[in-house]
Image: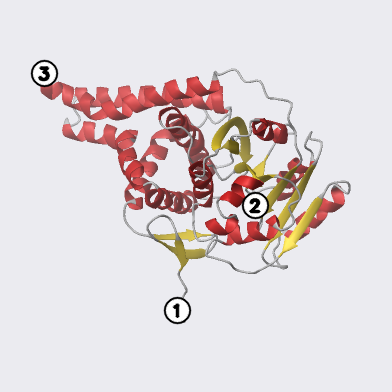
């Protein structure tokens, strides 16, 4: 009898975690919310480098906000950056918008994105700031959604979840499944069990006073995970962090390959490992693919092993469907459901590789990760 139960015991942690994420997600998304009528002026800081998918449309979505007063500051490091003509076209298309472009190649640390933010910050006019990635697209209600929580003076930062609905190709689908089937459930669980002590880089709204309390963007310039560090530093400074239920859209290139996705995932994995080593190591227990694989192998692919793996993936698939269809609303499932085991296998591989090695590739540059998440660029010899 015990031998027959072993495969089910092996898959139990991943099975239990799937159910926990479902409970935590329901607890967050089913909560009724009434936004206060609070819309203070806000400066949007947009660091850019190179072209993303549909760059003009992504930028234009910020210009179409239903909001009384806001400013957009783009920051690039080089006048030859191919995204600059797109920004100039944006300025011409929205002549009434308060849009500025800063071009400054000064290097203040290893994180070039934060260097751009430091330059954009000098042009920011307002006491509320928003930092958002160059590849996100938003609806007209975005600013009202993410700025309203600041009616509470204890709130120092509001971060947003993200998704990718316009998936084109297997590479994009593999990454987008990671958002709705891994990232969002993991954030829901962390929020419920620990509270929010970090930020998600796709969209972060923050008080200028909170940023100044932690030493400004300069405090982040040597970290790779500047979003995690920004949220964590503001949290430790005594401010409350809020997670907005508003999803921003992350635009993807349809031509992206699975290999390119894996390079980015490995960078994220190694960054999380050095930022939260204990939690990242423990997260391996909750991964479904190794649990199913070990259950099959230990049982000799017996009927019990197959049943344990099938039960795990039946629950895993059901939870993924609820997140994708009901809460994230990314329209990925059921169309891409067949990719879920592959996505889980790749996630396990990335997790295992993240435990060793300290080199990452980011925007064409190679960096060495040190303890705590700081980075040093690796200079090519010769």
Q: Is disc 3 surrounded by few (<14), some (14 to 19) or many (20+) residues within 10 Å? A: few
Left or right: where does residue 350 sit relative to residue 163? left
Left or right: where does residue 256 sit relative to residue 57? left
Q: Distance between the residues labelled 2 and 3?
A: 56 Å
Residue at the spot 50% in from the left edge and 26% down from the top edge: 323
Q: Name the residue under label 2.
A: 52
Q: Which of marks 2 and 1 is in front?
A: 1
Q: Which of marks 3 and 1 is in front?
A: 1
SS class, disc 1: loop
* Callouts 3 and 1 close, C-beta under 8 Å: no
Q: Mark 3 points at which residue?
A: 1
Residue at the spot 71% in from the left edge and 62% down from the top edge: 82
Q: Which of 25 and 264 is in front in this view?
A: 25
**Image x and y of residue 47, in percent:** 65, 55
Q: Is disc 1 surrounded by few (<14), some (14 to 19) or many (20+) residues within 10 Å? A: few
Q: Is disc 2 surrounded by few (<14), some (14 to 19) or many (20+) residues within 10 Å? A: some
Q: How far apart are marks 2 and 1 (CA)?
A: 30 Å
SS class, disc 2: loop
Q: Name the residue under label 1.
A: 381
Q: Which residue lies furthest to the bottom in this view?
A: 382
């Amino acid at each position: 009898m015990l031998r027959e139960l072993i495969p089910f015991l092996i898959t139990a942690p991943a099975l239990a975690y799937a159910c926990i994420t479902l409970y935590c997600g329901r607890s967050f998304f089913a909560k009724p919310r009434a936004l206060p009528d609070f819309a203070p002026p806000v400066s949007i800081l947009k660091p850019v480098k190179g072209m993303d998918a549909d760059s003009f449309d992504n930028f234009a979505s910020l210009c179409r906000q239903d909001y009384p007063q806001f400013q957009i500051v783009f920051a690039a490091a080089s006048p030859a950056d191919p995204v600059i003509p797109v920004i100039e076209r944006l300025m011409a298309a929205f002549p009434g918008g308060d849009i500025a472009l800063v071009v400054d190649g000064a290097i203040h640390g290893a994180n070039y994105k934060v260097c751009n933010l430091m330059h954009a910050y000098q042009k920011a006019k307002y006491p509320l700031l928003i930092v958002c990635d160059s590849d996100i697209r938003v609806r007209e209600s975005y600013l009202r959604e993410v700025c309203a929580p600041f009616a509470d003076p204890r709130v120092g930062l509001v971060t947003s979840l993200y998704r990718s609905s316009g998936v084109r190709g297997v590479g994009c689908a593999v990454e987008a499944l990671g958002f709705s089937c891994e990232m969002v459930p993991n954030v829901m669980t962390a929020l419920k069990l620990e509270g929010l002590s970090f930020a998600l880089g796709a969209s972060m709204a923050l008080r200028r006073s909170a940023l100044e309390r932690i030493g400004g963007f300069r405090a982040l310039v040597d970290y790779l995970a500047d979003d995690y560090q920004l949220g964590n530093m503001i949290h430790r400074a005594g401010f409350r962090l809020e997670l907005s239920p508003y999803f921003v859209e992350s635009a993807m290139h349809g031509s992206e390959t699975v290999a390119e996705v894996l390079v980015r995932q490995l960078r994220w994995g190694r960054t999380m490992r050095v930022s939260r080593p204990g939690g990242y190591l423990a997260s391996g227990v909750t991964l479904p693919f190794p649990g199913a694989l070990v259950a099959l192998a230990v049982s000799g692919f017996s009927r019990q092993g197959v049943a344990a793996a099938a039960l795990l993936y039946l629950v895993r698939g059901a939870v993924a469907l609820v997140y994708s269809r009901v809460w994230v609303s990314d329209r990925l499932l059921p169309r891409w459901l067949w990719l879920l085991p592959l996505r889980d296998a790749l996630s396990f591989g990335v997790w295992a590789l993240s435990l060793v090695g300290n080199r990452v590739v980011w925007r064409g540059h190679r960096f060495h990760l040190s303890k705590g998440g700081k980075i040093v660029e690796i200079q090519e010899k010769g």
